[in-house]
Image (spheres, rainbow, N blue to C red):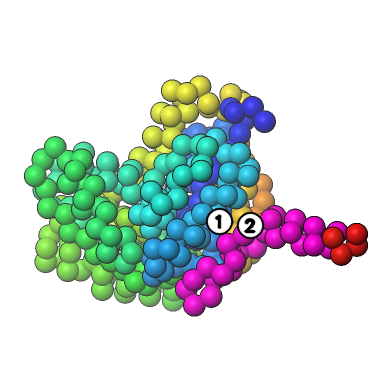
């Protein structure tokens, strides 16, 4: 496959990365996209660092085997452990956190709020990066939400589920918005832009920063600069792989308005027991080992 025709990889613990796909499809309609959502292991935000790094490594290998020309880590939580995992990848990697922090640092805000998973919050990666990138003196307040990503993953289009999402949003955000009075809020988990209408309704006038827009722009700049944009006149496709429920992913893709979905397929998850990876081998490797063991038996 020529490099220009190669697909772009997008990955997340679940459907959150669909918020990034949405922006990429708008800005780069000619590109083919491969999506991996690790529905079997969501929420990543409540796992420990080694588990997140191992789960991410499994998805990176999936993308590497399919020779993607760029990889969008459409998961802020994985972005926190990227330095442990980027090694071995032959394509450039775009991080959700880097994009979100860069977008926030450019704002005229004095008090910036960030909502994210607990893991991302505890890493304090957003405050550190925003303070490092901002030319002005800013205050960054971060809040970790233990349940929000999981609620969003399974509630879109379901009135009772969305009521729980909104209740959870108020629980997590009221203090930051109404008492600390942040000037804006970074949606530091890719699931949250999928419910930005609810956030806007609850907190009218609060500017929201969705790292997806910045990620899509950085990707476009990179492809243009390197001469790697797909030259086709027609539209590209999106193929979704999930270790979760195929029917649910197909429904969510429609609900969030993704276009040109060529297929939604199941992919075997990495084995994890009691929060620790048990078998980090790739299904292809397992099959090969199984086949060579069977061959040896036959010989
Ligand atoms: N969507 C992911 C993020 O951006 C994480 C959700 C989760 O699995 O906890 O951090």
**Residue position for label 1:** 58
Q: Position of residue 18 (x, y in %)?
A: 49, 52
Q: Are marks 1 and 2 in contact (CB under 8 Å)?
A: yes
Q: Earlier in the sequence, mark 1 or mark 2?
A: 1
Q: Quadrant of residue 271?
A: bottom right
Q: Residue 117 occupies which quadrant of the picture?
A: bottom left
Q: Is residue 189 magenta?
A: no
Mark 1: give few (<14), some (14-19) or many (20+) Cα within 10 Å. many
Residue 276 x/y as whole percent: 49, 71
The reply to whether residue 35 is visible in this rendering is: no
* Callout 1 secondary element: helix
Residue range highlighted in magenta: 267-295
* Ligand 1 image-quadrant field: bottom left
Q: Is residue 63 visible?
A: yes
Residue 282 badge: 2
Q: Could you give the CA–CA distance between mark 1 and mark 2, rounded to whole angstroms?
A: 7 Å
Q: Which of the pair 279/140 is nearer the observer? A: 279
Residue at the left extreme, as displayed: 137
Image quarter in which the N terminus is found: top right
| Whether residue 49 is situated above or below residue 60 in the rendered picture | below
Q: Nearer the viewer, residue 285 or 220?
A: 285
């Amino acid at each position: 496959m020529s490099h220009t025709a190669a697909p772009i990889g997008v990955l997340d613990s679940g459907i959150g990365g669909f918020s990034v796909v949405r922006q990429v499809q708008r800005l780069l309609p000619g590109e083919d996209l491969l999506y991996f959502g690790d529905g079997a292991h969501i929420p990543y935000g409540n796992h420990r660092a080694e588990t997140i790094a191992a789960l991410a490594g499994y998805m990176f290998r999936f993308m590497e085997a399919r020779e993607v020309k760029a990889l969008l880590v459409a998961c802020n939580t994985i972005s926190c452990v990227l330095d442990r995992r980027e090694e071995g990848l032959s394509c450039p990697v775009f991080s959700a956190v880097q994009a979100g922090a860069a977008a926030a640092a450019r704002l005229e805000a004095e008090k910036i709020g960030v909502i994210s998973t607990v893991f991302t919050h505890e890493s304090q990666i957003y405050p550190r990066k925003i303070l490092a990138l901002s030319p002005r003196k800013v205050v960054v307040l971060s809040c970790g939400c233990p349940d929000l990503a999981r609620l969003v993953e399974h509630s879109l289009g379901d009135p009772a589920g969305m009521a729980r999402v909104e209740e959870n949003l108020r629980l997590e955000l009221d203090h930051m918005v109404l008492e600390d009075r942040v000037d804006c809020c970074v949606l530091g988990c890719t699931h949250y832009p999928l419910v930005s209408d609810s956030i806007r309704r609850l907190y009218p006038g609060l500017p929201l920063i969705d790292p997806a827009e910045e990620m899509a722009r950085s990707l476009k700049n990179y492809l243009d600069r390197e001469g790697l944009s797909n030259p086709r006149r027609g539209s590209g496709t999106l193929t979704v792989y999930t270790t979760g429920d195929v029917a649910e992913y197909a429904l969510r893709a429609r609900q969030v308005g993704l276009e040109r979905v060529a297929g939604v397929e199941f992919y075997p998850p990495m084995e994890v027991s009691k929060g620790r990876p048990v078998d980090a081998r790739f299904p292809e490797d397992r099959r090969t080992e199984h086949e060579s063991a069977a061959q040896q038996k036959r010989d």
